[in-house]
Amino acid sequence: MSDSESLDHLKRKIATADAANQMKSNFLATMSHEMRTPMQTVYGFLELIELEKPTPNVQELVTIAKNSASSLLEILDDILDFAKMDADKMELDEFEVPVRTLVMGTLEALSVKVQSNSVKLMGEVDQNVPFVILGDPKRLRQILMNLIGNALKFTKSGTISINVFDKVKHIKPTKGQIGLRFEVVDTGIGMPKTVSEKLFSPFTQADNTTARKFGGTGLGLSICKKLVELMGGKIGVDSKEGKGSTFWFEIPTKEISTDTSTTPLPDLDGISILSLEDHPQGAKEIQRSLESMGASIESCRTITEARNLIKRRPFDIAVIDQGLPDGLGLDLIRELMHLRPQTGIVMYTVRDDVGLQHTCQSLGVTYLSKPASRLGLGEAVKAASQNRLHVNRDVPCRLLIAEDTASVRDVFKRQLKSLKVEADFVENGADALKAFKTNKYGILFTDLHMPEMDGYELTKTIRASEKEEIEDRFPIIALTADVQMSQRQIYLEHGFDECLLKPVSLGQFKRLLYRWGLLEEDIGPIMPDIPAMTQRDSLSDIPAAPHIIDLPALCDLMGCAEKDAAEMLAAFPAMSDPIIQKIQQAWDVKDMHALGEAAHSLKGAAKSACCPLLAEAASDLQDAVATGSVSEPHITQVWRKFSEVEAEIKKF
């Protein structure tokens, strides 16, 4: 046979082998998909049986069947992953990975599988390890879950621990990278070197008796090896028979600053979210992540606390953990779907439960495994927001707004006109109470500091006339420029259902009215992009000093309606001049109560007109009155900043 014939023969052999390998991968993937379909049907029927509240004996049988179905679905997922990697179709994501949440979440997820009190799960992350790294959180979690799950099979007593270090032995990170070493250390039965050398081969276990005694397909460690290699790392095991094992893997990665993001994040501006998470660090990370995208978060640690809040007010989205101190998140989800059917729901859990994932899917609930990157969490909230329903309340849609500052009323009137929402305005709590008794309104927005009767007394009076049932209460929304008042414990204590901080953007108004069933149009989760202002003499063409008038904020406030924004600015000096005069008059006669009230009104007016330095000067004056340290320079500063605003507006 000539050299050319030998080469052709070799090429045909390679092509035949590649084709056979592709056929095998396709078969495994098809088999996995085809078997999942009937298994999901079986699981769905088992859930329906549970909902019928069967007898204890039947419930026990259903639970056993569900656990078996979940185990089979996990095996099918392993087969599908193996098929993808075998066909070189597995692709990794690159997101932010909070290392400590990854470790603690994995331990929490597997704690339910610990069969004996004599086995303790532990975790330690070296202080030099970055808080956030770049990687694939789902696949890193999968590797750790497999390694710890494997350790649980072979450890009857002692400890299983995850340790993470920033020093590696088997890889060499390139410039700009760092190396991380993950170890899963157990005190189990261990194994001889002859066994450990072949342990990462597919469909391989320690010996023939292992599968019979401990179960499993032998795919888990093979999948771990392929995933680690895809990450550019190495994996191995150090073990001695009778003395436990240390499974380790090392990967190159990069440290990510907690103040930056590697990818553009979703815009969740104004979306109201209930977060139910009992772990303090986890709750902080959820809140910090979603607030960085513009969302408003109320965080609860128990089902009881969350249930009481849900009965009191609606939310756009609920992000709920599964394992909670006083029950299961899934039970609250079913209750929430009855109490507030318009709320979008995200199940955010460390539980690696295929059955739970299927249940959420059947309920229309977005399922997300911890830890997720900021992008992953934001996208899940965005998806849930798009899937939420709109529920019209059987109440009047007219708004009642109590606000004593003319310029703030003017902003609200223009915003509501663009929303085509009808509202009546009053200037004090006494008039608001009279209007409320006409039963013409579906919701009340009230400022807190008003003449005759303030917002606190108004709300207290209305609440005293209502029944005890929380869900039958009339919705009252606090309008304030006081950041402290926006804390849930404070505004709920005073009888309010929500709190809107001035200035209130058009998007916030839209979402709140939609949440309460007072606006028919579904505005969706994302505000439309601000269109470019290209016309001559538009607001963007005027060189306004941003520290005097914040034009981008004004555009958000008015929904990019340039005409309304310009008209509102033009009217602001005349509307605010009486407040300035009240400040001067109160200072001249040293009426500190009147001075504080006028300063508060000016602060709200300036914030609503997006004049930050004037608002700051008014806030400083109000604080000085409260502490008894007010002086002439405080008054002078207010006059100076007001004059700057007047001069700037004349440019328009």
Image (cartoon, rainbow, N blue to C red):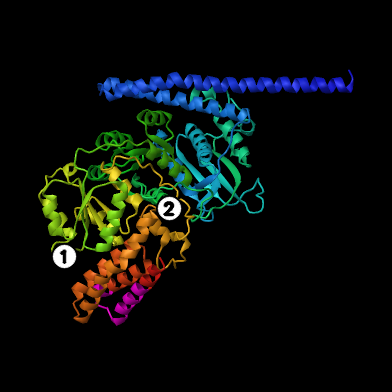
**Which quarter of the figure is the N terminus placed in?**
top right
Kindly report which numbered mark, 2 or 1, lies closer to the viewer in this rendering. 1
Q: Quadrant of residue 30?
A: top right
Q: Residue 292: which disc?
A: 2
**As rendered, which of 596 and 337 lies closer to the eye?**
596
Q: Is residue 370 at all visible to an observer of this figure? A: no
Where residue 151 appears, x then y in whole percent? 50, 35
| Residue 618: quarter of image | bottom left
Upstream in the sequence, badge 2 or badge 1?
Answer: 2
Up/down of 548 relative to 140, above or below: below
Q: Tell me: residue 122, above or below residue 58.
A: below
> Of helix, strand and loop, which mostly describes the magenta segment?
helix
Instruction: Say which of 390 and 219 sits in front.
Output: 390
Amino acid bearing label 2: Ser
Q: Which residues are magenta?
A: 624-643
Residue 638 painted magenta: yes
Q: Are discs 2 and 1 less than 8 Å apart at CB?
A: no
Is 278 one of the magenta-colored residues?
no
Q: Which residue position holds label 1?
A: 451
Q: Residue at x 12, y 54 (%)?
A: 433
Residue 237: x and y, percent? 60, 38
Side of 299 relative to 5 (left or right): left
Report the disc number at residue 418. Answer: none
The x and y percentages for residue 620 are 31, 72
Label 2: few (<14), some or many (≥20) within 10 Å? some
Q: Is residue 347 left or right of residue 456?
A: right
In the depicted structure, whether residue 5 falls above or below residue 256: above
- SS state under label 1: loop
